Amino acid sequence: MSDAIASATTAYTDGGSLRAYEKEMQRIIARGHSAAWLAGTSERMGIPLDSPLLSQSRLSRAERADIKALVSSQLEYLKGFTDAAGDMSPEAVAARANLYAGATRASYYKSATEADLPCYPGGCPSCYGRCRCDLETRDDGIHWICLDDPSSCSDCVERGNTWTPYAGGGE
């Protein structure tokens, strides 16, 4: 996904159309979240990612709805990004575009854990997925693992301190 984002971003910053860039990023984001979902499902089920049992067409309606919701939230961010991109330097455009690759982690974790959490690593609205958080499924539940470092926002650090394991409720 990162290569596709870099290629699309370079085409745009080298003089390409903003609308064409937005359309390509929409496609990349949707494809990336679907791939992350399948990778999470593969992990959870213990089957190879290339198994014929695992494909986009075999996803349930609920799984497709979950992916669609995750993609939809990213497309809202993308609209704001593309509205501002014309006033940004090529470096700033590239840095912001790269955040979309990290956001696919939320799809992976939602699928891998089958948990209904209020937030997943990669989907934190405070750090936009820049953190290096992880979820671990243990016998007593799901634990949010957070490295308390400069890449982690205070919300992620708080989750790391309180989701040991996640007990439900709100954020």
Image (cartoon, helix red, strand yellow):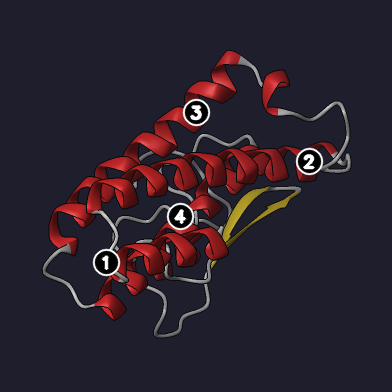
At mark 4, the secondary structure is helix
Q: Amino acid at mark 3?
A: Asp
Q: Residue at 35% across / 42% down in the picture?
A: 23
Q: Amino acid at mark 2?
A: Ser
Distance (Cα) linking label 4 and label 2: 19 Å
Query: In which quadrant will I find the N terminus?
Result: bottom right
At mark 1, the secondary structure is loop
Distance (Cα) linking label 2 and label 3: 16 Å
Q: Quadrant of residue 99?
A: bottom left
Distance (Cα) linking label 4 and label 1: 27 Å
Q: Earlier in the sequence, mark 4 or mark 2?
A: 2
Q: Nearer the viewer, mark 2 or mark 1?
A: 1
Could you classify mark 1 by the number of other residues whose Cα lies within 10 Å: few (under 14), some (14-19), or many (20 or more)? few
Q: Earlier in the sequence, mark 2 or mark 3?
A: 2
For disc 1, the marked residue is 15
Could you classify mark 2 by the number of other residues whose Cα lies within 10 Å: few (under 14), some (14-19), or many (20 or more)? many
Q: Position of residue 129 (x, y in %)?
A: 42, 62
Q: Earlier in the sequence, mark 4 or mark 1?
A: 1
Q: Residue at 34% across / 47% down in the picture?
A: 171
Q: Amino acid at mark 4?
A: Ala
Q: Position of residue 165 (x, y in %)?
A: 58, 52
Q: Residue at 49% across / 28% down in the picture?
A: 66
Residue 42's disc is: 2
For disc 3, the marked residue is 66
Q: Residue at 82% across / 43% down in the picture?
A: 49
